[in-house]
């Protein structure tokens, strides 16, 4: 994995308008977290490209997985949700990355992919760094974006360079599109309905749509 970047997942080398799971559906059955850890730290897989404190890895080619998933964890997203975000990203890869090294799809396959995703979901973002909870952000769209979206998306107005999700300066989405996506999620992006208030979703959507590409 490398600089494609979940937050976030995260994540997302997928298009903002895509809906549903990426490929292969949600994780099924029992995952072997120990095998996932072994695979993550293997020289040919993840640790060389990603920072993950629990794995002792400090890669910078791909996104920092602790940063990408910390806000989601603190806001109450389930471990299974994070696991499926990571699993979809493994399956999909990043696609082409401007000025960076793309993450190939299916770097690990089948049960191994699920095990890696389960391992990352079990430890990512569990460190001591803190993120401002939504209740303290008010309806400040820029602050909400920086707290919840910047690890996954590039948006110059917010000073963010995440590549897990689409580059919003390039996409220039309409406000209604952003509201729908933030509310319902899609592809590997989790839904923020119930995590952010309707007013906060409108605020962040207004910020993104009015500042993207400027």
Image (tube, rainbow, N blue to C red):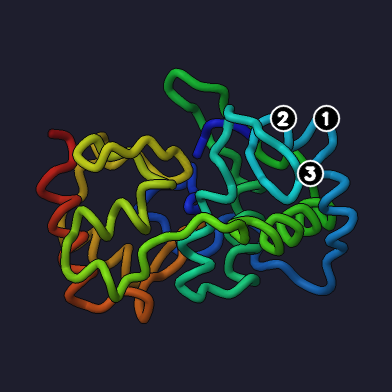
Q: Which mark is residue 154?
A: none
Mark 2–mark 1 CB contact (< 8 Å): yes
Mark 2 — residue? 48
Screen quadrant of the C terminus: top left
Mark 3 — residue? 40
**What SS does tag 3 mark?**
helix
Query: On the picture, is 89 further left or further right than 138?
Result: right
Tell me the quarter of the picture where residue 139 sits: bottom left
Query: On the picture, is 61 further left or further right than 12?
Result: right
Mark closer to the chain start, 2 or 1: 1
Query: On the picture, is 190 further left or further right than 94?
Result: left
**What SS does tag 2 mark?**
loop
What whole-number distance in Å separates the C-alpha atoms at marks 1 and 3? 8 Å
What whole-number distance in Å separates the C-alpha atoms at marks 3 and 2? 9 Å
Could you say which is closer to the camera, residue 5 or residue 110? 5
Label 3 packing within 10 angstroms: few (<14), some (14-19), many (20+): many
The x and y percentages for residue 85 are: 58, 59
**What SS does tag 1 mark?**
loop
Mark 1 — residue? 43
Mark 1–mark 3 CB contact (< 8 Å): no
The x and y percentages for residue 48 are: 72, 30
The x and y percentages for residue 70 are: 52, 59
């Amino acid at each position: 994995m490398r600089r494609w970047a979940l937050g976030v997942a995260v994540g997302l080398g997928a298009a903002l308008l895509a809906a549903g799971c990426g490929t292969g559906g949600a994780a099924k059955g029992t995952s072997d977290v120990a095998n996932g850890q072994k695979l993550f730290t293997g020289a040919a897989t993840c640790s060389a490209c990603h920072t993950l404190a629990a794995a002792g890895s400090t890669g910078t080619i791909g996104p920092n997985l602790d940063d990408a998933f910390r806000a989601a964890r603190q806001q109450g997203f389930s471990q299974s949700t994070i696991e499926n975000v990571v699993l979809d990203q493994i399956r999909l890869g990043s696609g082409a990355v401007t000025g960076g090294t793309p993450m190939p799809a299916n770097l690990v396959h089948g049960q191994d992919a699920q095990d890696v995703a389960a391992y990352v979901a079990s430890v990512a973002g569990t460190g001591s760094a803190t993120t401002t909870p939504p209740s303290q952000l008010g309806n400040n769209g820029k602050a909400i974006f920086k707290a919840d979206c910047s690890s996954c998306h590039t948006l110059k107005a917010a000073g963010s360079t995440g590549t897990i999700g689409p580059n919003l300066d390039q996409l220039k989405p309409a406000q209604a599109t952003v509201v729908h996506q933030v509310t319902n999620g899609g592809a590997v992006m989790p839904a923020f309905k119930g995590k952010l208030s309707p007013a906060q979703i409108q605020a962040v959507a207004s910020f993104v749509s009015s500042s993207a590409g400027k």
